[in-house]
Amino acid sequence: MLHNFNSGPSILPQSVLQQAAEAVINYNNAGLSLLELGHRTNAFQEILQEAKDAVKQLMQLNEEYEVLFLHGGATTQFMQIPMNLLDNTATAAYCDNGIWGNKAYKEARNFGNVVLVSDGNAEKYQSINKNFTVPADAAYLHITSNNTVEGTQWHSYPSTNIPLIADMSSDIFSRPTEFNKCSLIYAGAQKNMGAAGVNLVVLKKNILGKISRPIPTIMNYQKHIEAGSLMNTPPVFAVYVSMLTLRWILQEGGLIEMGKRNKAKSTLLYNTIESLPIFTAPVANEDRSEMNAVFFLKDAALEEPFLALCKQEGMVGVKGYRTVGGVRVSMYNALPIESVQVFCDLMQFFAQKNG
Amino acid sequence: MLHNFNSGPSILPQSVLQQAAEAVINYNNAGLSLLELGHRTNAFQEILQEAKDAVKQLMQLNEEYEVLFLHGGATTQFMQIPMNLLDNTATAAYCDNGIWGNKAYKEARNFGNVVLVSDGNAEKYQSINKNFTVPADAAYLHITSNNTVEGTQWHSYPSTNIPLIADMSSDIFSRPTEFNKCSLIYAGAQKNMGAAGVNLVVLKKNILGKISRPIPTIMNYQKHIEAGSLMNTPPVFAVYVSMLTLRWILQEGGLIEMGKRNKAKSTLLYNTIESLPIFTAPVANEDRSEMNAVFFLKDAALEEPFLALCKQEGMVGVKGYRTVGGVRVSMYNALPIESVQVFCDLMQFFAQKNG
């Protein structure tokens, strides 16, 4: 029995995997594989429409927003966002609270002026600085809602008069949140939303059309809106897996239910860490991520034996990111609390032996 | 019984679909879905390496070439190629032999000077003009090796002293061809190579590093080479389906065998068209595509009843492209000759009734 704590690509609901596998053989009993179906067929149009509708429903957003499913991962958006929204002579504001936010910031510098309003690097990204000012004339403010590598999470988004842009790759649809504070939300699908190979972009139409740079067609949000996410052949299978996962979230009770489950899982894990003196979690309490818990063995010599025990007992993906080290436990929507309980029992067993 | 003549996404080998479906449930009997596996695991590294090796083997290319699997479709490459290879003040040469080549040409104009050395639009793209001169100082010459919509194909690539770039999306791996005449070959996977959502790019390293424009990281070929196609989370499932399809091509006998089969299928179809006076194929004989045959009913009033009969008899995807009309029959690698025979029998039946 494996327990999948992978940070992404990561655990998906079993029912989604079953339906996705069936579709690869014979989609909807129509005699062809989903992989062999044209993307302009009614069959695929219905998949795409259901996925878009589910996003709007889960986020409770109105008609000012458009939902796009695009090729690529969040890294593609690091480029596409400033390409569409940051003029050569304009300024964008970025929060650097982890390696992904840092990468997003660096890419934006290819397109215009960029100011770092919050830089967590000096504190090793162990908390999120929320006291900063943003230039009033900035084109937008960019945050990373959850820092997968460092284990921090924004529990309330900053209030600002300029468009707020959030990379929600690793906590999208994990709980009810302030989606309507954002003018652009994006996420690679491969954590809470599906398989790698597709990007969700949700944006307010009124932020577009304000820059003078010519934008390559395939990168142009406005053109994708006009083409209904069908400018070219979309990543059909990845869109389908996203649709199935979104449908599963709705069937299970939506974001309120996801939020309850994720709160219960992360509370169990953080309480266990706090109760066992051999472990330590350096992230500030108020900024701890409900998705990715990062912690350490106080005695670094115990890290290797602990990770070896985890591996032996079927705990997958709990080694910390290579630049951070330690232990990282990812608890996405599809992870059952039973897996967290088994992991916590293992921590207790190890602590008793080595305490 | 369905016969899948879709132009793309299109028919794939049944054994590939079976293995892909199994991997979605339980990859390699290791207890997790392929969709739940990290892309930096040995399991995925082996998939990627096998796919790259198969490409090199099938194309018989030496170590001067690199193989990349990238996010997006060929449309992404329309932008990525000039972004990497065409300086602001330099000139690139394009052949416009169909709607995709035309789109590639238009995108390149965002990055530098572009000259159309061959424009088939005036002849409705019914032949490929091969008598043209290319500016000696052009950065590269771009062709579309097979025109999916118009049904034409380059049967020998132009010889030139500048780098030749070929969009092979719709005839890649369909026969032995002059891969080594090209400095960059690209293809969206969703025809002969797999599922939508991944791009194959094969390039000669010595064409890189010659422009002054800063290139966004995710679009930078050099950075992708350095990262071994793992700069960010790749489209894992689409890469896997490509690997399985490449393995299938090798197992079936490689490009020589694919070429024999495709020649047999297209010969059967074109001979049937020629033998039945109610049909007409306007494409010049020497430029006819072995992948996509485009033809018409001489009496346009018969088109609708013919397409209705096709639908009734399980012939999928034979309606011509919306800007061209008529009939289009796509015969990719995985299509058995039996499907072409059944379709030709139907043409004969229809001709007898309406001749």
Image (cartoon, coloured by chain):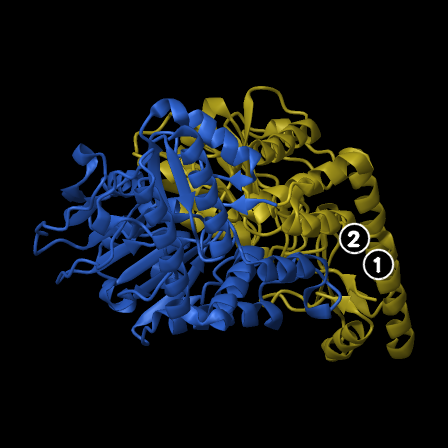
Chain colours: A yellow, B blue
Number of marks drawn: 2
Q: Residues within 10 Å of mark 1 (few under 14, many from 20)?
A: some
Residue visible at 46% across and 44% down in the picture: B345
The image quarter containing residue A298 is bottom right
**Residue position marked by numbered label 2 in the rendering:** A335
| Image marks 1 and 2: residues in contact by CB distance under 8 Å | yes
Q: Chain of mark 2?
A: A
Q: Nearer the viewer, residue A111 or B172?
A: B172
Side of B67 relative to A331 (left or right): left
Q: Is residue A138 visible?
A: no
In the image, residue B21 above or below residue A186: below
Q: Which mark is residue B274?
A: none
Side of B132 relative to A197 (left or right): left
Side of A295 relative to A107 (left or right): right
Residues at discs 1 and 2 both on one chain: yes
Q: Nearer the viewer, residue B189 or A163?
A: B189
Q: Disc 1 on helix, strand or loop? A: helix
Q: Amino acid at mark 1?
A: Ser
Residue visible at 83% across and 51% down in the picture: A265
Q: Position of residue A316 (x, y in %)?
A: 74, 66
In the image, residue A213 above or below residue B214: above
Q: Amino acid at mark 2?
A: Leu
Instruction: State how far apart marks 1 and 2 are (Cα).
Output: 7 Å
Q: Position of residue B94 (x, y in %)?
A: 19, 46
Q: Chain of mark 1?
A: A
Side of A231 relative to B104 (left or right): right
Q: Quadrant of the C terminus of chain B?
A: top left
Q: Is residue A341 visible?
A: yes
Q: Position of residue B87 (x, y in %)?
A: 20, 50
Q: Which mark is residue A339?
A: 1
Q: Nearer the viewer, residue A12 or B21?
A: B21
Q: Disc 2 on helix, strand or loop? A: loop
